[in-house]
Image (tube, rainbow, N blue to C red):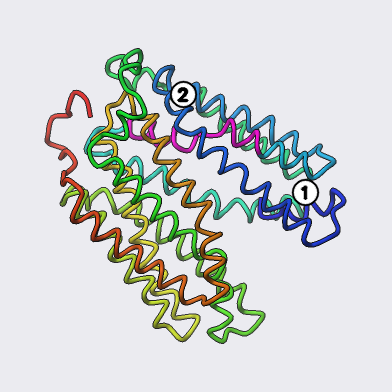
Amino acid sequence: MPFLPLYLEQLGLNDVGEISLWAGLSLGVTPAVTAFMAPIWGRLGDRYGRKIMVERSLVSFVVVMAAMSYVTKPWHVFALRAVQGLFAGYGALTLTMAADSAPPEQTAYAIGFVQTAQRLGPALGPVIGGLVAQAAGLRKAFLVTAGFYAVAAMLVALVYDERSVFKKDTRGKTGQVTFRNVLAFENFLLLMVVIFGLQFVDRSFGPVLPLFVATLGAAGGKVTIVAGILFSVAAGTAAVGHHVCGPLLRRGSARGVIASGCATAAVGVGGYLLTTNAWWLTLPTAIFGVAIGVATTAAYTAATTVIPMDARGAGFGLLTTASLVGLAVSPIVNGILGATSIRAVFALDAVLLGALAILVSRVMISGTLPSPSAPAPEEI
Protein backbone atom coordinates (compact mmCIF):
# COMPACT_ATOMS: atom_id res chain seq x y z
CA MET A 1 0.00 0.00 0.00
CA PRO A 2 2.82 2.59 0.52
CA PHE A 3 3.43 2.40 -3.24
CA LEU A 4 -0.20 2.96 -4.21
CA PRO A 5 0.44 6.53 -5.49
CA LEU A 6 3.01 5.15 -7.94
CA TYR A 7 0.50 2.56 -9.11
CA LEU A 8 -2.13 5.25 -9.68
CA GLU A 9 0.41 7.13 -11.77
CA GLN A 10 0.82 4.03 -13.92
CA LEU A 11 -2.97 4.00 -14.40
CA GLY A 12 -2.81 7.36 -16.17
CA LEU A 13 -3.00 10.01 -13.46
CA ASN A 14 -0.49 12.81 -13.97
CA ASP A 15 -1.67 15.58 -11.67
CA VAL A 16 -0.14 15.32 -8.18
CA GLY A 17 -3.36 16.56 -6.59
CA GLU A 18 -5.43 13.88 -8.32
CA ILE A 19 -2.96 11.17 -7.34
CA SER A 20 -3.03 12.36 -3.72
CA LEU A 21 -6.84 12.46 -3.70
CA TRP A 22 -7.36 8.97 -5.14
CA ALA A 23 -4.60 7.51 -2.95
CA GLY A 24 -6.12 9.07 0.17
CA LEU A 25 -9.62 7.86 -0.70
CA SER A 26 -8.40 4.36 -1.58
CA LEU A 27 -6.30 4.00 1.56
CA GLY A 28 -8.99 5.44 3.82
CA VAL A 29 -12.02 3.52 2.56
CA THR A 30 -10.80 0.12 3.78
CA PRO A 31 -10.43 0.97 7.50
CA ALA A 32 -13.61 3.07 7.32
CA VAL A 33 -15.72 0.16 6.04
CA THR A 34 -13.89 -2.31 8.30
CA ALA A 35 -14.73 -0.19 11.36
CA PHE A 36 -18.41 -0.67 10.55
CA MET A 37 -18.20 -4.35 9.61
CA ALA A 38 -15.81 -5.71 12.29
CA PRO A 39 -18.48 -6.10 15.03
CA ILE A 40 -20.85 -7.76 12.54
CA TRP A 41 -18.27 -10.31 11.40
CA GLY A 42 -17.30 -10.85 15.03
CA ARG A 43 -20.94 -11.49 15.90
CA LEU A 44 -21.21 -14.04 13.10
CA GLY A 45 -18.00 -15.61 14.40
CA ASP A 46 -19.65 -16.04 17.79
CA ARG A 47 -22.57 -17.78 16.14
CA TYR A 48 -20.89 -19.92 13.48
CA GLY A 49 -17.26 -20.16 14.62
CA ARG A 50 -14.23 -17.89 14.29
CA LYS A 51 -12.30 -20.16 11.93
CA ILE A 52 -14.75 -20.04 9.04
CA MET A 53 -15.01 -16.25 9.35
CA VAL A 54 -11.22 -15.84 9.16
CA GLU A 55 -11.06 -18.21 6.17
CA ARG A 56 -13.83 -16.19 4.49
CA SER A 57 -11.89 -12.96 5.01
CA LEU A 58 -8.55 -14.34 3.81
CA VAL A 59 -10.02 -15.99 0.69
CA SER A 60 -11.79 -12.76 -0.22
CA PHE A 61 -8.47 -10.91 0.12
CA VAL A 62 -6.85 -13.39 -2.28
CA VAL A 63 -9.48 -12.49 -4.88
CA VAL A 64 -9.33 -8.74 -4.24
CA MET A 65 -5.53 -8.53 -4.34
CA ALA A 66 -5.33 -10.63 -7.49
CA ALA A 67 -7.93 -8.37 -9.11
CA MET A 68 -5.87 -5.28 -8.14
CA SER A 69 -3.17 -6.39 -10.56
CA TYR A 70 -5.63 -6.13 -13.48
CA VAL A 71 -7.28 -2.74 -12.82
CA THR A 72 -7.18 -0.07 -15.51
CA LYS A 73 -8.82 2.94 -13.82
CA PRO A 74 -8.25 4.69 -10.46
CA TRP A 75 -11.88 4.11 -9.45
CA HIS A 76 -11.29 0.37 -9.87
CA VAL A 77 -8.67 0.57 -7.10
CA PHE A 78 -11.06 2.50 -4.87
CA ALA A 79 -13.89 0.02 -5.48
CA LEU A 80 -11.69 -3.00 -4.72
CA ARG A 81 -10.38 -1.35 -1.54
CA ALA A 82 -14.00 -0.79 -0.47
CA VAL A 83 -14.77 -4.47 -1.10
CA GLN A 84 -11.67 -5.36 0.89
CA GLY A 85 -13.01 -3.40 3.85
CA LEU A 86 -16.40 -5.07 3.49
CA PHE A 87 -14.94 -8.56 3.85
CA ALA A 88 -12.16 -7.70 6.32
CA GLY A 89 -12.32 -8.29 10.05
CA TYR A 90 -9.79 -11.08 10.51
CA GLY A 91 -7.69 -8.86 12.81
CA ALA A 92 -10.28 -8.80 15.57
CA LEU A 93 -11.11 -12.46 15.04
CA THR A 94 -7.48 -13.58 15.36
CA LEU A 95 -7.22 -11.77 18.68
CA THR A 96 -10.40 -13.53 19.75
CA MET A 97 -8.98 -16.89 18.65
CA ALA A 98 -5.79 -16.22 20.61
CA ALA A 99 -7.81 -15.39 23.74
CA ASP A 100 -9.99 -18.49 23.28
CA SER A 101 -7.02 -20.80 22.75
CA ALA A 102 -4.96 -19.75 25.76
CA PRO A 103 -5.44 -20.81 29.39
CA PRO A 104 -6.70 -17.86 31.46
CA GLU A 105 -3.28 -17.17 32.98
CA GLN A 106 -1.69 -17.05 29.49
CA THR A 107 -4.28 -14.80 27.83
CA ALA A 108 -2.11 -11.68 27.97
CA TYR A 109 0.84 -13.58 26.45
CA ALA A 110 -1.31 -14.96 23.62
CA ILE A 111 -2.87 -11.58 22.78
CA GLY A 112 0.52 -9.87 23.01
CA PHE A 113 2.06 -12.45 20.68
CA VAL A 114 -0.60 -11.84 18.02
CA GLN A 115 -0.28 -8.07 18.44
CA THR A 116 3.47 -8.40 17.95
CA ALA A 117 2.79 -10.09 14.61
CA GLN A 118 0.39 -7.27 13.74
CA ARG A 119 3.21 -4.78 14.44
CA LEU A 120 5.84 -6.67 12.48
CA GLY A 121 3.62 -7.16 9.42
CA PRO A 122 3.33 -3.43 8.55
CA ALA A 123 7.01 -2.98 9.43
CA LEU A 124 8.27 -5.70 7.06
CA GLY A 125 5.56 -5.47 4.40
CA PRO A 126 6.80 -2.28 2.69
CA VAL A 127 10.34 -3.65 2.54
CA ILE A 128 9.20 -6.91 0.93
CA GLY A 129 6.76 -5.05 -1.31
CA GLY A 130 9.46 -2.65 -2.46
CA LEU A 131 11.79 -5.49 -3.39
CA VAL A 132 9.04 -7.35 -5.27
CA ALA A 133 7.88 -4.19 -7.05
CA GLN A 134 11.42 -3.39 -8.13
CA ALA A 135 12.07 -6.92 -9.35
CA ALA A 136 8.72 -7.78 -10.94
CA GLY A 137 6.74 -4.55 -11.22
CA LEU A 138 3.87 -3.07 -9.19
CA ARG A 139 1.15 -5.16 -10.83
CA LYS A 140 2.84 -8.45 -10.02
CA ALA A 141 3.45 -7.24 -6.46
CA PHE A 142 -0.31 -7.51 -5.92
CA LEU A 143 -0.23 -11.12 -7.11
CA VAL A 144 2.53 -11.86 -4.59
CA THR A 145 0.36 -10.27 -1.89
CA ALA A 146 -2.53 -12.51 -2.95
CA GLY A 147 -0.15 -15.46 -2.54
CA PHE A 148 0.64 -14.42 1.05
CA TYR A 149 -3.08 -14.34 1.85
CA ALA A 150 -3.54 -17.75 0.22
CA VAL A 151 -0.80 -19.23 2.42
CA ALA A 152 -2.42 -17.68 5.49
CA ALA A 153 -5.80 -19.13 4.52
CA MET A 154 -4.29 -22.61 4.11
CA LEU A 155 -2.53 -22.35 7.48
CA VAL A 156 -5.80 -21.52 9.23
CA ALA A 157 -7.66 -24.27 7.38
CA LEU A 158 -5.09 -27.00 8.03
CA VAL A 159 -3.53 -26.09 11.39
CA TYR A 160 -6.09 -24.30 13.55
CA ASP A 161 -8.39 -26.79 15.28
CA GLU A 162 -11.39 -24.92 16.59
CA ARG A 163 -12.86 -28.04 18.18
CA SER A 164 -10.02 -28.18 20.69
CA VAL A 165 -10.66 -24.59 21.79
CA PHE A 166 -14.20 -24.79 23.06
CA LYS A 167 -14.52 -27.12 26.01
CA LYS A 168 -18.24 -26.80 25.59
CA ASP A 169 -20.33 -25.57 22.71
CA THR A 170 -21.02 -21.93 23.41
CA ARG A 171 -22.47 -21.29 20.00
CA GLY A 172 -26.23 -21.17 19.88
CA LYS A 173 -26.36 -19.03 23.03
CA THR A 174 -25.33 -15.92 21.11
CA GLY A 175 -28.93 -14.89 20.64
CA GLN A 176 -28.96 -14.02 24.33
CA VAL A 177 -26.19 -11.44 23.90
CA THR A 178 -26.73 -8.24 21.88
CA PHE A 179 -24.34 -5.41 21.06
CA ARG A 180 -26.09 -3.39 23.76
CA ASN A 181 -25.33 -6.16 26.25
CA VAL A 182 -21.67 -6.13 25.23
CA LEU A 183 -21.43 -2.37 25.68
CA ALA A 184 -22.94 -2.76 29.15
CA PHE A 185 -20.25 -5.19 30.32
CA GLU A 186 -18.13 -3.95 33.20
CA ASN A 187 -15.39 -1.53 32.06
CA PHE A 188 -16.12 -2.22 28.37
CA LEU A 189 -16.98 1.33 27.28
CA LEU A 190 -13.97 2.60 29.20
CA LEU A 191 -11.73 0.09 27.42
CA MET A 192 -13.10 1.27 24.05
CA VAL A 193 -12.15 4.84 24.99
CA VAL A 194 -8.68 3.69 26.07
CA ILE A 195 -8.05 1.76 22.84
CA PHE A 196 -9.28 4.69 20.75
CA GLY A 197 -6.97 7.06 22.64
CA LEU A 198 -3.94 4.78 22.39
CA GLN A 199 -4.44 4.30 18.64
CA PHE A 200 -5.02 8.03 18.17
CA VAL A 201 -1.70 8.84 19.85
CA ASP A 202 0.19 5.95 18.24
CA ARG A 203 -0.80 7.10 14.74
CA SER A 204 -0.18 10.79 15.37
CA PHE A 205 3.53 10.49 14.59
CA GLY A 206 3.12 9.56 10.93
CA PRO A 207 2.13 12.98 9.51
CA VAL A 208 4.61 15.06 11.53
CA LEU A 209 7.65 13.05 12.66
CA PRO A 210 9.80 13.55 9.53
CA LEU A 211 9.00 17.26 9.62
CA PHE A 212 9.89 17.44 13.32
CA VAL A 213 13.22 15.70 12.67
CA ALA A 214 13.96 18.33 10.00
CA THR A 215 13.16 21.21 12.38
CA LEU A 216 15.67 19.81 14.87
CA GLY A 217 18.45 20.42 12.38
CA ALA A 218 18.95 17.05 10.72
CA ALA A 219 20.55 17.42 7.31
CA GLY A 220 18.23 16.91 4.36
CA GLY A 221 19.69 13.55 3.42
CA LYS A 222 19.50 12.28 7.00
CA VAL A 223 15.88 13.19 7.70
CA THR A 224 14.46 10.04 6.10
CA ILE A 225 17.11 7.87 7.76
CA VAL A 226 16.49 9.29 11.24
CA ALA A 227 12.70 9.19 10.82
CA GLY A 228 12.87 5.61 9.56
CA ILE A 229 14.98 4.57 12.53
CA LEU A 230 12.55 6.25 14.95
CA PHE A 231 9.56 4.47 13.37
CA SER A 232 11.43 1.16 13.64
CA VAL A 233 12.35 1.84 17.27
CA ALA A 234 8.70 2.62 18.07
CA ALA A 235 7.48 -0.58 16.38
CA GLY A 236 10.19 -2.77 17.93
CA THR A 237 9.78 -1.47 21.48
CA ALA A 238 5.99 -1.71 21.20
CA ALA A 239 6.45 -5.39 20.35
CA VAL A 240 8.56 -5.73 23.50
CA GLY A 241 5.77 -4.04 25.44
CA HIS A 242 3.24 -6.54 24.13
CA HIS A 243 5.40 -9.37 25.46
CA VAL A 244 6.19 -7.97 28.92
CA CYS A 245 2.56 -7.13 29.58
CA GLY A 246 1.68 -10.67 30.69
CA PRO A 247 4.06 -10.81 33.69
CA LEU A 248 2.98 -7.31 34.72
CA LEU A 249 -0.68 -8.31 34.72
CA ARG A 250 0.05 -11.37 36.85
CA ARG A 251 1.69 -9.14 39.45
CA GLY A 252 -0.86 -6.36 39.50
CA SER A 253 -4.30 -5.26 38.42
CA ALA A 254 -5.29 -4.42 34.87
CA ARG A 255 -6.24 -0.96 36.08
CA GLY A 256 -2.76 -0.34 37.45
CA VAL A 257 -0.97 -1.68 34.38
CA ILE A 258 -3.09 0.32 31.91
CA ALA A 259 -2.86 3.53 33.94
CA SER A 260 0.89 3.15 34.44
CA GLY A 261 1.38 2.38 30.75
CA CYS A 262 -0.55 5.50 29.72
CA ALA A 263 1.36 7.66 32.22
CA THR A 264 4.73 6.29 31.10
CA ALA A 265 3.81 6.82 27.44
CA ALA A 266 2.92 10.42 28.31
CA VAL A 267 6.40 10.85 29.78
CA GLY A 268 7.92 9.43 26.59
CA VAL A 269 5.94 11.83 24.38
CA GLY A 270 6.82 14.66 26.74
CA GLY A 271 10.46 13.94 25.98
CA TYR A 272 9.80 15.11 22.42
CA LEU A 273 8.97 18.54 23.76
CA LEU A 274 12.32 18.77 25.58
CA THR A 275 14.67 17.21 23.02
CA THR A 276 16.72 19.51 20.81
CA ASN A 277 18.74 16.86 18.96
CA ALA A 278 17.11 14.50 16.47
CA TRP A 279 19.19 11.47 17.48
CA TRP A 280 18.21 11.88 21.14
CA LEU A 281 14.60 11.21 20.12
CA THR A 282 15.40 7.48 20.18
CA LEU A 283 15.24 7.45 24.01
CA PRO A 284 11.74 8.95 24.46
CA THR A 285 10.58 6.94 21.44
CA ALA A 286 11.71 3.69 23.10
CA ILE A 287 9.97 4.65 26.37
CA PHE A 288 6.80 5.52 24.49
CA GLY A 289 6.89 2.32 22.42
CA VAL A 290 7.22 -0.06 25.36
CA ALA A 291 4.53 1.77 27.35
CA ILE A 292 2.03 1.91 24.48
CA GLY A 293 2.56 -1.81 23.82
CA VAL A 294 1.95 -2.68 27.47
CA ALA A 295 -1.17 -0.52 27.75
CA THR A 296 -2.69 -1.82 24.50
CA THR A 297 -2.24 -5.49 25.35
CA ALA A 298 -3.47 -4.90 28.91
CA ALA A 299 -6.64 -3.23 27.59
CA TYR A 300 -7.49 -6.12 25.25
CA THR A 301 -6.65 -8.67 27.95
CA ALA A 302 -8.85 -6.88 30.47
CA ALA A 303 -11.70 -7.14 27.98
CA THR A 304 -11.45 -10.94 27.96
CA THR A 305 -12.19 -11.02 31.70
CA VAL A 306 -15.58 -9.32 31.28
CA ILE A 307 -16.80 -10.71 27.93
CA PRO A 308 -18.28 -14.23 27.89
CA MET A 309 -16.69 -16.56 25.35
CA ASP A 310 -19.86 -16.68 23.25
CA ALA A 311 -19.74 -12.89 22.83
CA ARG A 312 -16.00 -12.35 22.38
CA GLY A 313 -16.18 -12.00 18.61
CA ALA A 314 -18.67 -9.13 18.89
CA GLY A 315 -16.73 -7.61 21.78
CA PHE A 316 -13.36 -7.66 20.03
CA GLY A 317 -15.08 -6.39 16.89
CA LEU A 318 -16.31 -3.33 18.79
CA LEU A 319 -12.84 -2.78 20.25
CA THR A 320 -11.42 -3.00 16.73
CA THR A 321 -13.94 -0.38 15.61
CA ALA A 322 -12.66 1.95 18.33
CA SER A 323 -9.09 1.29 17.19
CA LEU A 324 -9.89 1.92 13.51
CA VAL A 325 -11.74 5.14 14.29
CA GLY A 326 -8.64 6.33 16.13
CA LEU A 327 -6.56 5.27 13.13
CA ALA A 328 -8.78 7.29 10.78
CA VAL A 329 -9.20 10.42 12.91
CA SER A 330 -5.62 10.81 14.14
CA PRO A 331 -3.86 11.73 10.86
CA ILE A 332 -6.57 14.28 10.04
CA VAL A 333 -6.55 16.01 13.44
CA ASN A 334 -2.79 15.95 13.87
CA GLY A 335 -2.13 16.96 10.28
CA ILE A 336 -4.25 20.09 10.82
CA LEU A 337 -2.68 20.74 14.23
CA GLY A 338 0.82 20.15 12.85
CA ALA A 339 0.24 22.87 10.25
CA THR A 340 0.07 25.30 13.17
CA SER A 341 2.76 23.81 15.42
CA ILE A 342 4.42 20.39 15.28
CA ARG A 343 5.20 20.49 18.99
CA ALA A 344 1.49 21.05 19.65
CA VAL A 345 0.86 17.53 18.30
CA PHE A 346 3.13 16.00 20.94
CA ALA A 347 1.66 18.27 23.63
CA LEU A 348 -1.82 17.02 22.74
CA ASP A 349 -0.58 13.42 22.84
CA ALA A 350 0.93 13.90 26.30
CA VAL A 351 -2.23 15.53 27.64
CA LEU A 352 -4.46 12.82 26.16
CA LEU A 353 -2.31 10.00 27.60
CA GLY A 354 -2.24 11.71 31.00
CA ALA A 355 -6.01 12.07 30.91
CA LEU A 356 -6.39 8.37 30.05
CA ALA A 357 -4.13 7.43 32.98
CA ILE A 358 -6.24 9.49 35.39
CA LEU A 359 -9.52 8.22 33.91
CA VAL A 360 -8.51 4.56 34.18
CA SER A 361 -7.15 4.92 37.73
CA ARG A 362 -10.34 6.68 38.88
CA VAL A 363 -13.08 4.86 36.95
CA MET A 364 -11.94 1.34 36.05
CA ILE A 365 -13.05 -1.44 38.37
CA SER A 366 -9.89 -3.28 39.35
CA GLY A 367 -9.21 -6.94 38.67
CA THR A 368 -6.32 -9.35 38.20
CA LEU A 369 -5.75 -12.22 35.82
CA PRO A 370 -6.03 -15.77 37.13
CA SER A 371 -2.70 -17.12 38.37
CA PRO A 372 -1.26 -20.34 36.90
CA SER A 373 -2.15 -22.20 40.07
CA ALA A 374 -5.72 -21.00 40.16
CA PRO A 375 -8.47 -23.16 38.63
CA ALA A 376 -9.69 -21.87 35.30
CA PRO A 377 -13.15 -20.32 35.55
CA GLU A 378 -15.91 -22.10 33.72
CA GLU A 379 -16.70 -18.99 31.72
CA ILE A 380 -14.63 -15.84 31.44
Residue drawn at 36 percent across, 58 percent down: 292
Asked whether, in this view, residue 276 is left or right of residue 78, the answer is left
Q: Nearer the viewer, residue 233 or 296?
A: 296
- Tag 1: residue type? Leu
- The spot of residue 240 in percent (x, y) is 37, 57
- The spot of residue 82 in percent (x, y) is 65, 37
Q: Residues within 10 Å of mark 1 (few under 14, many from 20)?
A: some
- The spot of residue 319 in percent (x, y) is 39, 41
Point out the stretch of residues depicted in magenta.
82-100
- Tag 2: residue type? Lys
Asked whether, in this view, residue 106 is left or right of residue 55, the answer is left
The first of marks 1 and 2 along the sequence is 2
- Tell me which secondary structure the magenta stretch mostly adopts: helix
Quickly name the residue at label 1. Answer: 138
Secondary structure under tag 1 reads helix
Asked whether, in this view, residue 178 is left or right of residue 156, the answer is left
Residue 98 within the magenta-colored segment of the rendering: yes
Whole-angstrom CA distance, mark 1 to mark 2, is 32 Å
Q: Nearer the viewer, residue 279 or 40?
A: 40
Height in image: 288 above or below 328? below
Q: Which mark is residue 51?
A: 2
Residue 155 within the magenta-colored segment of the rendering: no
